Amino acid sequence: MSLVTFLIGPVVGGVIGGFTNRVAIRMLFRPYEAKHIGPFHIPFTPGIIPKEKPRLATAIGQTVSQHLLSSEILTSTLLSDEMCQKLSAAVNTLQARLMAEEATLETYLLQYLDPEELEHVATQLQDDIAAAAYAKLADKALGHKVAAMAVDQVVERLSEGFLGGLKAGVVGLLRESIEHKLADIINEMMHNNAHQMVSDLLSTESQRLLHTPVCDLCRGREGLFAQLKTITLKAYDTLVRNSLPKMLDTLNIQQIIENRINEMDMAETEDLIVSILDKELKALVWFGVLLGFLLGFVTNII
């Protein structure tokens, strides 16, 4: 037997092996839809993956939601030492950046807010604080407290010496009348002027803050940043532990994955799978070539 004749069997076997494996891989995806000849359904159509797409979508959704993105796994990952260290480092980075920021607070905030939004936030904050402060200052009980404190100071200052004691005694006898009259005066003054006074004070202070460099506002407040870090880490821990399971239940990851896979066009699905398994699929084709070649070689020997 000549060498050419001897090699024909292995070569043909290799070609057939590679071709059949290539066809088998192709039949995983093609055709995308069932084919018919008249009333008869052509076997093996559609391909395996298009035919089993709904079942595969359900299986993948269950696997991902139960074993890859479950509440326990995500909680463990998000609360790992590595993640907490990254969050702590982010707060440290923010502190360092703010400590070195020479722009004014207004300029800094305008990086994140429009001028109108910043003005609205500042005005709303001033109004809320002014309303809360005015409610306290307009309370009639405050007038009586201030009046009592004022009378106490007058009695204390007048009580020195004999004549002072006499004056203090007179004031003491008239104490109730004096306190009542003084309280009325204070309450009327607060009612008429407190709101405007508080508003003017807050407006002045807010403008001063807005035009102060951020670094100056942060200087000497290292303890505040330490508290911020502690609060941030605690809030993050609480959010992950208490809210993550509810969020996952609401999102329903399994259903999202199922819907996304079912909505994907089969050509898109094929391109995705082939791009991921390109090397493996090519290796499978060459394995068919090798197996066919070896079978042809063995046949020649037998």
Image: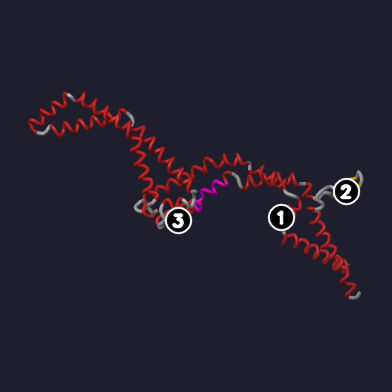
- The disc, 2 or 1, on the residue closer to the chain's N-terminal end is 2
On the image, numbered disc 3 is attached to which residue?
Answer: 93
> Mark 2, residues whose alpha carbon is within 10 Å: few (<14), some, or many (≥20)?
few
The boundaries of the magenta stretch are: 73-83
Q: In which quarter of the image is the N terminus?
A: bottom right
Earlier residue among tags 3 and 1: 3
The residue at 35%/45% (across/down) is: 204
Contact (Cβ within 8 Å) of mark 2 with mark 1: no
Please tell me whether mark 3 sits on a helix, a strand or a loop: helix
Q: Nearer the viewer, mark 3 or mark 2?
A: 3
Left or right: where 297 falls relative to 127: right
Q: How many marks?
A: 3
Q: In the rendered image, which residue does mark 2 sit on?
A: 42
CA gap between label 2 and label 1 equals 27 Å
Residue type highlighted by circle 2: Ile
Looking at the image, which is closer to me, 52 or 229? 229
Q: Mark 1 points at which residue?
A: 272
Q: Quick check: 278 above or below 159?
A: below
Left-right relation of 60 to 24: left
Of mark 3 and mark 2, the one earlier in the sequence is 2
Q: Do the residues labelled 3 and 1 touch (CB within 8 Å)?
A: no
Query: Tag 3: residue type?
Result: Thr
